[in-house]
C-alpha cells in the first residue's frame, strides 16, 4: 500500500489534538505506513490564502508538498480545507508548466523544487478506496450503537470535476464508512449544506457564519441523533466551539457531541474515548460520554 | 482601474459570458439565504465591468462551498470566478481587518491558528509531544517559510494601502 506522510495543518495539532491522536492510532491499527511531516506549515488555508494571492497560495502549498516529495510519500490530510488546498495546488502545478515554473522560481529561494511526484489524499477517500467499508469491518472490535448525523463538508467532494468522488447532491461513500462501524447514518434536512465556516466567513463575518451553523444544528437536532460526524477539523471546530457561540447568540441550548471520523473509527477499533480526545471538545454532553464509555468497555 | 474585470476572469480561464441569469446559483447559496450575497448579480456586474463589485463586502460572504458552481446549468465556474474577483479586490487594497490579521499570524508563526497553552496541556494528556511536528517546532523551517512569503511579496500585499 501507498506510503504516507501525515499532514496536520493548523487546527488539528493546535486545537483538536484528539483528532491527531485518533488518526495515528487508527492508521497504526490498520497497518498503514504513515509518518510525521516535520516542518510542515499551514496548508495554507484555502478560504483566505486562495482568496488573497494565487502565487503565495501555490508557494506555501508546494513547500508542504515538496517536504513530502523528498520523503517519497503521498500526503495524507484529515481536513477538507488542507485537502482542497494541497490537492488543488498539486493538480494545478502538475498540469500547468508555466505555473510550475513561476512557483519553482519562488521555491528556488529556499532551495526547493516542485517535481510533481506524489499524490495528496484525504483520509476518507483513502479509507474508502484502499479499504472500503467491507474490509474495514474486519478490523472492528466494538460495533457502535450510535445514531449519527454525517456532515461531508464541501471540499472533500467539490469541485466534483477535480475530486472524482461521484455526484455531490446525495453521495453515499462516506455514509458507508460510517455504517461500517455499526453506527446508523441518519438522513436530515440540508445534510449537504456547508457548515458556514469556510471561505474566510468564520473569521471575517462571524455573525453570518453562526446563522448558517444554527440552521444546520436545527436540522440535525430534528433528526434526533447521538452525535455529528465530520471529516474536517474546521467543520469540527465550527460545530463544536461554534455551537456554544450559537447558544450565546440565539439563546438556544444545543448540546450535540461532535466527532471527527478518526475518532468514531477509533472507538470501533477499540480505543478509549480518553485516548481519542473525545472529552476535550467544547461541547460537554455527559449522557453521550457515558454511552461511549459503555461501548468502549464492552457494556453495550 | 484599468483592467477590465471580464478580461481578468478570461485570462484566468474563467468564462462567465454564457450566464443566462437563471438564478440557480443564487437560489442554491447557503450564505445568500442569510445575507445580501447574490452571485447572479455579481456575475452580471462583473460582465458589465462594474468595478464596485470589488469593494462590495458581499464578495467576502461566500464560504466557497461550490454548490452554485456544481448546479449551474451552463457549467460556469462561479466559485472560482468569485475567488478571482477576491484576489483582484485584494490587489486593489480591499481586505477585511480580520483577514489581514490571519495573514499576519501566518507570517509570524507559519500557522493560521497557532498553538496555545491550553492545547499543549491537552496534547500531553493524550500522550502527544506538547509541540507538534510542524513549523512551530523547527526554527529553521519557520525562517524558510518567512523567506518564501517575502519572496512572494505577501507582506507587501497585505500591508494596509
Ligand atoms: S446558475 Fe449559472 S447560468 Fe444561472 S445565473 Fe447563476 S451563473 Fe448564470
Ligand atoms: S460557493 Fe459561495 S456563492 Fe456559491 S453557493 Fe457556496 S457560498 Fe454561495
Image: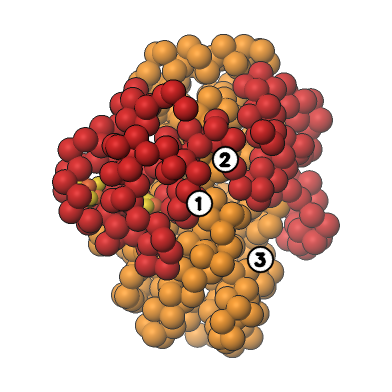
Chain colours: A orange, B red
Q: Secondary structure at mark 2?
A: loop
Q: Along the line of sight, which residue is nearer the eye, B50 or A67?
A: B50
- Could you say where residue A216 lies in the image, as x and y percent from the top left? 43, 73
* Image side of residue B35 versus residue A205, left or right: left
* Above or below A61: residue A270: below
The residue at 52%/18% (across/down) is A103
Q: Along the line of sight, which residue is nearer the eye, A97 or B17?
A: B17
The residue at 30%/37% (across/down) is B48
Cβ at disc 2 under 8 Å from ligand 2: no
- Could you say where residue A248 lies in the image, as x and y percent from the top left? 64, 80
- Could you say where residue B24 lies in the image, as x and y percent from the top left? 22, 56
Q: Which residue is mark 2?
A: B94
Q: Secondary structure at mark 3?
A: loop
Circle 3 residues within 10 Å: few <14, some 14–19, many ≥20: many
The residue at 27%/54% (across/down) is B25
* Image side of residue A77 versus residue B47, left or right: right
Q: Secondary structure at mark 1?
A: helix
Question: CA separation, marks 2 and 1?
Answer: 9 Å
- Which label belongs to residue A277? 3
* Image side of residue B109 versus residue A181, left or right: right
* Above or below B22: residue B52: above
Q: In the rendered image, is residue A134 in sight?
A: no
Name the image quarter holding residue B29.
Answer: bottom left
Q: Which residue is mark 1?
A: B57
Question: CA separation, marks 3 and 2?
Answer: 40 Å
> Marks 3 and 2: which is nearer the front?
2
Amino acid at each position: 500500500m501507498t506510503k504516507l506522510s501525515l499532514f496536520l495543518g493548523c487546527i488539528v495539532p493546535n486545537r483538536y489534538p484528539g483528532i491527531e491522536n485518533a488518526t495515528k492510532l487508527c492508521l497504526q491499527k490498520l497497518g498503514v505506513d504513515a509518518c510525521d511531516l516535520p516542518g510542515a506549515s499551514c496548508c495554507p488555508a484555502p478560504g483566505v490564502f486562495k482568496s488573497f494571492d494565487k502565487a503565495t497560495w501555490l508557494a506555501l502549498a508546494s513547500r508542504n508538498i515538496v517536504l513530502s516529495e523528498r520523503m517519497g510519500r503521498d500526503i495524507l490530510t484529515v481536513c477538507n480545507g488542507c485537502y482542497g488546498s494541497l490537492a488543488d495546488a498539486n493538480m494545478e502545478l502538475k498540469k500547468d508548466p508555466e505555473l510550475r515554473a513561476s512557483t519553482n522560481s519562488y521555491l528556488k529561494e529556499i532551495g526547493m523544487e516542485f517535481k510533481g511526484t506524489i499524490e495528496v489524499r484525504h483520509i476518507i477517500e483513502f479509507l474508502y478506496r484502499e479499504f472500503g467499508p467491507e474490509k474495514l469491518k474486519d478490523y472492528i472490535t466494538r460495533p457502535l450503537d450510535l445514531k449519527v448525523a454525517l456532515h461531508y463538508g464541501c471540499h472533500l467532494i467539490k469541485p466534483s470535476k477535480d475530486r472524482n468522488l461521484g455526484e455531490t447532491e446525495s453521495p453515499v461513500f462516506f455514509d458507508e464508512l460510517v455504517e461500517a462501524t455499526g453506527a446508523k447514518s441518519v438522513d436530515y434536512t440540508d445534510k449537504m449544506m456547508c457548515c458556514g465556516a469556510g471561505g474566510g466567513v468564520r473569521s471575517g463575518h462571524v455573525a453570518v457564519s453562526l446563522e448558517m451553523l444554527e440552521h444546520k444544528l436545527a436540522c440535525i437536532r430534528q433528526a434526533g441523533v447521538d452525535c455529528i460526524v465530520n471529516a474536517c477539523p474546521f467543520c469540527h471546530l465550527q460545530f463544536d466551539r461554534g455551537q456554544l457561540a450559537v447558544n450565546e447568540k440565539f439563546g438556544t441550548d444545543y448540546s450535540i457531541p461532535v466527532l471527527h471520523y478518526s475518532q468514531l473509527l477509533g472507538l470501533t477499533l477499540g480505543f478509549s474515548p480518553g485516548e481519542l480526545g473525545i472529552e476535550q471538545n467544547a461541547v460537554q454532553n455527559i449522557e453521550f460520554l457515558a454511552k461511549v464509555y459503555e461501548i468502549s468497555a464492552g457494556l453495550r | 482601474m484599468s483592467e477590465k474585470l471580464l478580461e481578468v476572469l478570461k485570462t484566468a480561464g474563467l468564462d462567465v459570458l454564457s450566464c443566462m441569469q437563471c438564478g440557480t446559483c443564487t437560489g442554491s447559496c447557503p450564505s445568500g439565504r442569510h445575507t445580501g450575497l447574490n452571485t447572479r448579480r455579481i456575475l452580471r456586474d462583473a460582465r458589465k465591468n462594474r468595478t464596485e463589485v470589488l469593494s462590495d463586502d458581499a464578495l467576502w460572504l461566500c464560504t466557497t462551498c461550490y454548490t452554485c458552481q456544481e448546479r449551474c446549468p451552463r457549467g460556469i465556474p462561479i466559485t472560482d470566478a468569485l475567488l478571482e474577483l477576491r484576489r483582484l479586490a485584494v490587489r486593489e487594497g480591499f481586505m477585511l481587518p480580520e483577514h489581514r490579521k490571519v495573514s499576519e499570524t501566518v507570517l509570524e508563526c507559519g500557522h493560521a491558528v497557532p498553538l496555545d497553552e491550553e492545547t499543549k496541556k491537552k496534547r500531553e494528556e493524550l500522550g502527544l509531544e506538547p509541540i507538534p511536528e510542524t513549523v512551530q517546532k523547527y526554527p529553521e523551517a519557520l525562517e524558510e517559510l518567512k523567506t518564501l512569503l517575502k519572496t512572494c511579496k505577501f507582506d507587501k500585499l497585505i500591508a494596509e494601502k
